[in-house]
Amino acid sequence: MYKKMRLIDIVRIAPEKLGEPKKESVKVALQENLEGMIDKKLGTVVSILDVVEVGEGHIILGDGAVYYDATFDAIVFMPVMQEVIEGMVVEIVEFGAFIGIGPMDGLLHISQITDEYISCDSKNARLVTKEMGRSISVGDKTRARIVAMSLNEREPRDSKIGLTMRQPALGKLDWIEEDRNSETKK
């Protein structure tokens, strides 16, 4: 889930940046330090929107930089357990598919796609169901539920999100539309 949040942090402005406008240099420093960072309480900082207030500067002995208390607005992405999300397939592997959900990818294990047997067609980079012949490939839009999460603050790339599509109204969006159309024809 994306949220707009007002946050407070202490920002270090290097001595060579002190001649620039204060708000601009604080925003650039916040962007460099925080964008892409994962915090277990906040989520992933996607973007620093605006610096609302910059407090008095403090100088620490032995460091020529100035430290400012800054209040700023940011967009953060925090996946929530059991949240239904829509995303695009970004990679197909033998054991499932990776779905892009905002700044992260979630793993959709092959056992969590459908009740049918699924085989991996690695030559064409797609997963194919045995009975109905439906397939999932890179670029397909999907709807899934978050069923497992492990966010790693130190190594954001090691964060893991587990997804499922084995429930009504979840799956590849084309499949959901096909199912709706077949129900209305009955």
Image (tube, helix red, strand yellow):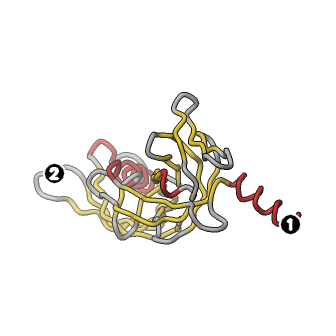
The quarter of the picture where residue 171 lies is bottom right
Q: Which residue is mark 2?
A: 63
Which amino acid type is marked by label 1?
Answer: Thr
Residue for point 45% across, 71% down: 81
Q: Position of residue 18 (x, y in %)?
A: 33, 48
Distance between mark 1 and mark 2 Cα atoms: 70 Å
Q: Earlier in the sequence, mark 1 or mark 2?
A: 2
Image position of 142 with respect to 73: above or below: above
Circle 2 SS class: loop
Mark 2 residue crowding within 10 angstroms, few (<14) / some (14–19) / many (20+): few
Give the residue displayed 29% in from the left and 63% down from the top: 57
Residue at image coords 82%, 60%: 182
Q: Does residue 98 appear to the left or right of 87 in the view shown? A: left
Residue 66's x, y, as percent?
26, 56
The relative height of residue 58 versus residue 18 in the rendered view (above or below) is below
Residue at the extreme top: 123
Q: Residues within 10 Å of mark 1 (few under 14, many from 20)?
A: few
Quickly name the residue at label 1: 184
Please state the horizontal and vertical placement of residue 33, each as a whole percent of the image: 34, 52
**Along the line of sight, the residue nearer the viewer: 177 or 159:** 177
Camera-nearest residue between 140 and 72: 140
